[in-house]
Amino acid sequence: MKKNNIKLCSSIFKICGFILISLALVLTFYNLGEDFLAGRSSNNVLKELEDNKLVAEDFIPGTPDYMATPKMEMPTVKLDNTKYIGVITIDKIGIKLPVQGEWNFKKLRKSPAKYSGSAYLSNFIIAAHSYRSQFGRIWELKNGDKVKFEDMEGHIFEYEVIGKETISEKDGLKLEEGEWDLTLFTCSLNTQYRTVVRLRKIATY
């Protein structure tokens, strides 16, 4: 009787193990698919922005320069009902991505987005998913690594990494604490924490 019970338990454990492994594989392939689609979407947007040489919809000849009016809204280009404010380039991890002007968890599947602040006010915060095609590798950045952001009028802001930290998803206010010119963040693998990279501006042109 005991042998039968042991065999039964063993069979149940094997079945449960198979189910768990199967679910893990399904989740892995789902995430890879999401990552691929996000990368393709970003590339398509970049192509449209570059090939068509679109002009920011808010730009009017004679509008005061952002240096004279830093509180001005960042100019946008609208594509498929989504407004973009610029392009972020991080050579260290091989990404160049359009940045949306409005943060929305669903829209983050397309590309990174402004979480708050502005490049003009030096309090810019950009959020993205942890896909490898987005911010999945920002934890690899080290002090001194460079990041560039180009707005829709061609102004380029260059930054360098000066720190990294991990914060709980419940401590969202910490994202905006401190005097940082640029902050990049994404979810950690277990989604309970945020990987945060802090940067200072070193040049504009």
Image (tube, rainbow, N blue to C red):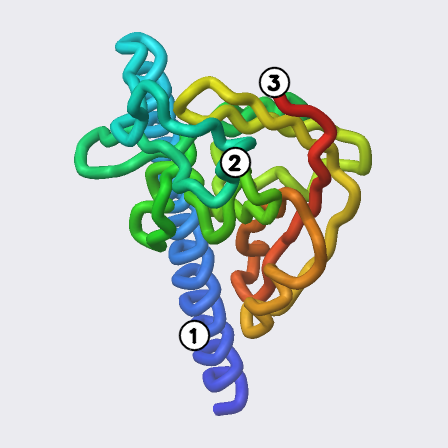
Q: Is residue 73 above or below residue 75?
A: below
Which residue is pictured at 50% across the width and 24% down the height?
150
Mark identifier at residue 121? none
Which residue is pictured at 61% across the width and 43% down the height?
122
Mark identifier at residue 132? 2
Q: Residue 124 appears in which quarter of the rendering?
A: top right
Mark identifier at residue 205? 3
Q: Amino acid at mark 2?
A: Arg
Of badges 1 and 2, nearer the viewer stands 2
Viewer-proximal residue, 14 or 162? Answer: 162
Which residue is pictured at 44% across the width and 62% down the height?
20
Q: Secondary structure at mark 2?
A: loop
Which residue is pictured at 73% across the width and 29% down the height?
202
The earlier-in-sequence mark between 1 and 2 is: 1
Q: Is residue 192 left or right of residue 71?
A: right
Can you give x and y, in whole percent of width and height, for residue 181 in the image?
Answer: 65, 44
